Image (cartoon, rainbow, N blue to C red):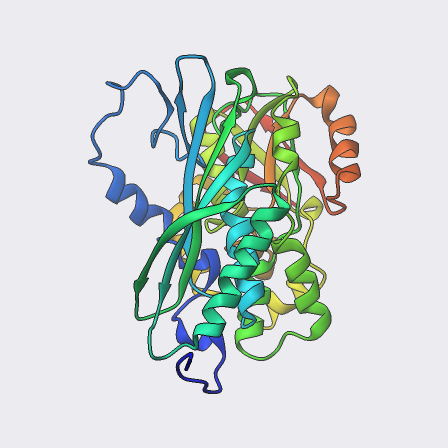
Amino acid sequence: MDDGPRIGFRLTELAHGGGCGCKLAPAVLQTLLAGSPAAAVFPQLLVGTETADDAAVWQLPDGTCVIATTDFFMPVVDDARDFGRIAATNAISDVYAMGGTPILALAILGMPLGRLPLETTREILAGGAEAAAGAGIPVAGGHSIDTAEPIYGLAVIGTCRPEHLRRNCGARAGDVLILTKAIGVGIYANALRKGALDAAGYAEMLASTTLLNRVGATLGREAAVHAITDVTGFGLLGHGLEMARGSGVRLRIDGAAVPLLERALAMAGQGFVTGASHRNWDSYGAGVALPAALPEAMRHLLTDAQTSGGLLVSCAADAAPALLARIHAEGYPRAAIIGRVEAGAAGITVDG
């Protein structure tokens, strides 16, 4: 049986963008959601769209919280199986960011029929299933359509107890901020599209983007952890700003302490900045105070769209060293304390 066209191509060439850099800019999304009907008439809906959280949460009569999320995007890499793994890992992250445990997923697939070999699509699905299996869940079904560009992701369902639920709006003045993964994925992905990322850089990016944020389920059981969000398409500053505004606090981030992929700063200075970085800054720059001496390349990294990025955690200061050690022990060697939470006007101040 003929599987369709077998032509030479790069998967990323079939899409105008890739990964979480495809997300609508924060300002655009805020405008779209501004007229959404209030969800207050559903008392079981513990988390909706009110604080730009990572997933919706519904409480069942027995107290169990059901976590529901969906995430999908266009190819961020050319290897089909790697694309599937990255997209699935990214989608599952939203459940972990709420302090929950995933239980099953459904595939979301859009493929340009006639332009993409079926074997390539099989590899994307296989990569997604592999990542889901790593999280201990099945891809139990899904939906597919014919699209102009390749699209893949998952709708993911998870659960947690109410006391383990962690939102992005619980940060408290006096807390310490921990970031669990290095940033710079958007810069690396742009370099890859332009043929400027070597094998070592690709391996570093893949290791980060396919690392499940399962530590979020552990952190949700820690009373000292007050807020969690995952850092994806809006960049560290964008998702940090959502945390600050939702919590009514000010985040103070030490720019020198933020972990970076090994070549991210150099590549940002060499012009591998994405359009998403500019859109992000234009959307929320007014809520962020930067030092005059901060290098432009570092500002671009702080706004860099992360695909399958790490967790931003706000926790009690006295518990932070032990929590950081535990995060390291659970397989996140680049995790670092990057700042603190202060009382004051909601927003972010960057030092360094």
State the image coordinates of residue 80 (x, y, percent, origin top left). 53, 69
Q: Measuring 39% from the left and 30% from the top, which residue is drawn there?
A: 51
Query: Picture quarter containing residue 2?
Result: bottom left
Query: What residue sits 65% from the left and 50% below the top?
Result: 211
Horizontal side of residue 327 vs 3, given as left or right: right
Q: Position of residue 154 (x, y in %)?
A: 44, 49
Which of these two is toward me, 303 or 231? 231
Q: Residue furthest top?
A: 62
Q: Which of these two is toward me, 177 or 203?
A: 203
Q: Position of residue 289 (x, y in %)?
A: 51, 42
Image quarter where the N terminus lies is bottom left
Q: Position of residue 294 (x, y in %)?
A: 60, 53
Q: Residue at x 23, y 18 (%)?
A: 41
Q: Is residue 269 above or below residue 164?
A: below
Nearer-the-camera pick, 21 or 330: 330
Number of marks in picture: 0
> Left or right of 62: which side holds 161?
right
Question: In the picture shown, does residue 266 fall above or below 250?
Answer: below
